[in-house]
Structures are given as C-alpha cells and as structure tokens.
Amino acid sequence: MKRIIMTFPDGKNKVLTLSYDDGKIADRKLVNLFNHYGLKATFHMNGGLLDQPERIPSSEVSTLYQGHEIACHTFTHPTMARCPEMNIVEEIIEDRKTLEVLAGYPVRGLSYPNGSFDQRVKSILPSLGIAYSRTVNSTGSFAMPQDLLEWNPTCHHKKNLLHLATEFFNLHKTQYLYMLYVWGHSYEFDSDDNWDVIENFSQMAEKQNDIWFATNIQIVDYLFAFQQLQFSASGEFVYNPSVQCVWLNVNQHVIEVTGGSQVKLN
C-alpha cells in the first residue's frame, strides 16, 4: 500500500499568509515591504469607504495590490451579528461588486468587520460567493483551518509575532502541515511606531526556503484542488480534474500532479 499525503507546492509542508484590514494609506508602505521580501498578503477592504480621507483611493487599488489578494470587509464595516439578513446580504454583495471592478477577478474572501459574526452570518456566506472568512480570534497555533468560514489566525502582529515566527521557522516534522497566519491593520504600525517589527519579521521569513508564501485564497483553492483529486482504488495513479497543480508525497517522494492530467504514482 502506498503512503500518499498532500503537501504544499514543491513538497513544502509549511505555509505563511498575512491578512490586513481596512485599506488605509499605510497599506502603501506595507505592500512595498512585502513585495521587497517576496511575501504574499490578503487585503480586506470596504468598497463603500474607498476614496475617503486616510483610505487608499479606488484609482490606486488595482496597481497597488497587484500580486496580492483583494478581499471583502463589507461595504460599510457594520457589526454584522447585529444586522438583519437583508443588510448582511447587501453589505457583502455591494462590497464584492465594487472591489471586483477594481480587482478584475472574482473577490471570494472576507474578514468579519469588528470581528463580529454568528452562525446566522456564516450560513449566508456560501450563497453570496464567499469561500472563507477570517476572524480576530488568534489561536497562537500553527494548525490548518478546520472551518474556512471561521478561519482563526495564529496571531495579530502585536502579539509575540517574532517569538511565534521563530518557533514556526524551526518546525521540521514533515508528517504535519503547518500554517502561520498573521493579521492586523497597517495603520497600527504608524500609531505604534513599530514598523521594525514587521520588517524584521519579513527579513526572517525571506531567508526560509521551506515555506510556501501564499494569499488566503491561494490556500483555499489549493485545499479544494486536493479534495477534487480522483485516486484509483489501487493507488497506482491519480487524475486531477482542476487547473490547479497539486503536489503529493508518495512514499517519501514528491510528485506534482498538474492540472487536467493523470499521473502514475510511482
């Protein structure tokens, strides 16, 4: 019997993703920093608040965030658990519509504004085209998400980031998948005068060669592509019906299963 397990691209078993809310002017500096060190981030934005003072103007969105992910944060940033269902639908759909015009692709991610949600809110999201939503409930762990509509991050960048990063970078057990998920607001680096924290973190991350740097939606799509793989009963071959490439570890050998291909698992 073959031992077949999922890996991240190129056989890696660790992933780093970053998530920043509100689309404030400080995103410019943060995006440039991430670009310099080769990191990937998701930026959650309020379509109804664009072009207000201290916010990234709509004319700049498509170019500034190129290479990263633009995602929803609702249209006007309400406390969602207190909203009627009609408003929840409007807030997300209008945010998607506005951001998709600027992004040029389907916007399928969300972070809960004010960290507010309940089961009623969660149950509505799939019908609105939302594939995942991030909470503000930091776990301090490196576990993969169990519920993508209640995706708990590892930490806010204010909370022991460099300590947790060092712990994450030193993980080496390949039988597990590990994720470091950092969230926050870019303007906090200005108000706290601690841009050195995220720069030091980014410098540390750049030196790691065993980590996949990914946006939130890239992780979601990769997990979905793995779930769609069609394995033969014997485990001798696998068919990948999606366009997304998936990497597998088969008896300690890394195999890439390209999109639309059938591959022998030798």
Image (spheres, grey):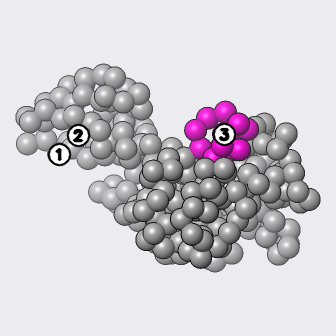
Judging by the rendered image, the residue that carries numbered circle 2 is: 250
Judging by the rendered image, the residue that carries numbered circle 3 is: 100
Q: CA distance from mark 2 to mark 1?
A: 6 Å
Q: With 178 as the anchor, is 169 left or right in this view?
A: right
Tags 2 and 1 in contact by the CB under 8 Å rule?
Answer: yes
Along the viewing direction, whichever of 206 and 96 lies nearer the viewer: 96
**Circle 3 residues within 10 Å: few <14, some 14–19, many ≥20:** some
The residue tagged with tag 1: helix, strand or loop?
Answer: loop
Identify the residue at horizontal 67%, vertical 51% (top origin): 95
- Amino acid type of disc 2? Val
Q: CA distance from mark 1 to mark 3?
A: 42 Å
Ranked by sequence position, the earlier of labels 2 and 1 is 1
Residue 106: tell me if it is visible. yes
- Amino acid type of disc 3? Glu
In reply to whether residue 120 is colored magenta, the answer given is no
Range of magenta residues: 96-107
Give coordinates of residue 205: x percent, y percent.
Answer: 61, 55
Give coordinates of residue 32: x percent, y percent.
Answer: 79, 47
**Circle 1 residues within 10 Å: few <14, some 14–19, many ≥20:** few
Along the viewing direction, whichever of 144 and 94 lies nearer the viewer: 94
- Amino acid type of disc 1? Arg
Ranked by sequence position, the earlier of labels 1 and 3 is 1
Along the viewing direction, whichever of 212 and 155 lies nearer the viewer: 155
Q: Looking at the image, is 181 positioned above or below residue 258?
A: below
Give coordinates of residue 209: x percent, y percent.
Answer: 53, 46
Judging by the rendered image, the residue that carries numbered circle 1 is: 3
Identify the residue at horizontal 32%, vertical 41% (top origin): 226
